[in-house]
Image (cartoon, rainbow, N blue to C red):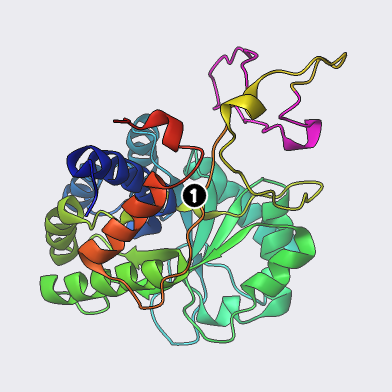
Amino acid sequence: MLKYLPFRLLIGCSLLMVCLQVSAAKLAIVIDDFGYRVKEDNQILALPAAVTIAILPSSPHGREVAEKAHQQGRDILIHMPMKPLSNQPLEKDTLSPSMSAEDIDQLIKNAIKRVPYAKGMNNHMGSEMTSSLPGMRNVMHSLSQSNLFFLDSVTIGNTQVKNAAKEYGVPTLRRHIFIDNHQSEEETRSQLNKAVAYARKHGSAVAIGHPHPSTVRALQKYLPQLPADIELVAVSSLLSPQPADKQPAKSLRMLSEEAKQPQNSGSSTPPSVTPEEEVQVQPEPEQEVTTVEAPPAELGLCEFETPKNKLQGIDFIMFVVEGIYHDKALQPLLLKD
């Protein structure tokens, strides 16, 4: 079939693994209601640091949990209590549509002080609050001054979160799957499978759970066996970048050795990278970053002819390997007779 089958398979599978890592579907898991259950909270904090936690601002252990999570490099959200349509006990300082903008702003500022290192906020309950456009306008006005994003838990169908956030430029995300509406390991595992399927179909998924013992057990068993094409990520990594000037996407292609040779030019900018293409990297807080000029890396795409029949499994892998092997830019790197 292939003349140098082992060698080509090694190259093809290695490149395929890199492609899978780059194109892996992203799954963010957020655990709400942190700050009350010390045992379960600590068990969640023992899970991979990509699992995000949402802390109730009036909880007795909220600040302590936030400190631990921050040391792990974990995303932290403020799990802000908001008024539901149903009649049930409310957390202290629950936001309501009837409150003034000043009162909402003050309660949010208090919550930010109680939950240090928070990157964003999501709603605890809140079907009445999130369905009120005036109420959510007040919330977004306050968040816009604090550089926080908002994750909509979607506790009601006609949520106004996105509409209000657009008016104030607040980045938003949306919950896709609840993993533990029914408290059992089987239910949580089933919902996690649904979250994985959603991520595969749409590229990413946000799943929300709670620190129930059954949820903890399910996550402890499920996450180590997460499929290879699914990447567990912090929820903030799913935010769309907000560039000041949007540039059209440019395709990256493999360049031949001749094309990579530097050309004589009076410009100090490398010829293969224009100023508009340079990537700006934001340094992490409290880290000193030294800028080092380096030659740009040339990444590329192999071009394939679309197969007549749908390929699966080993047939698809072999199709990719064949395409990589016959790519003209790669042929000089392969062994010859």
Residue in the picture at 57% in, 68% down: 95
Q: Which residue is mark 1?
A: 302
Quadrant of the rendering where the C terminus is positioned: top left
Which residue occupies 36% across, 32% down?
334
**Left or right side of 293 for 191:** left
Comparing 118 with 166, the one in front is 166
Residue 290 falls inside the magenta stretch: yes
Residue 226 in view (yes/no): yes
| Camera-nearest residue between 196 and 95 | 196
Residues in magenta, as a range:
271-295
Q: Answer with left or right where residue 138 lies relative to residue 324.
A: right
What type of secondary structure mainly makes up the magenta span?
loop
Of helix, strand and loop, which one carries label 1?
loop
Foreground of the two, 261 or 101? 261
Q: Is residue 82 magenta?
A: no
- Residue at the limit of the structure toward the front, as seen here: 337
Question: How many badges with numbers are in the image?
Answer: 1
Left or right: residue 109 compared with residue 176: right
Would residue 137 be found to the left or right of residue 89 on screen? right
Label 1 sits on what residue type? Cys
x and y, in percent, of residue 163 in the image: 71, 74
> Residue 290 lies in what quarter of the image?
top right
- Please name the residue shown 70% across and 52% down the image: 249
Residue 45, placed above or below residue 220: above
Residue at image coords 50%, 84% = 156
Task: Tell me residue 301's x, y (percent).
Answer: 52, 47
Which quadrant of the structure image shows residue 260? top right
Disc 1 packing (10 Å; few <14; some 14–19; many ≥20): some
Asked if residue 152 is positioned above or below residue 127 in the image, the reply reads above
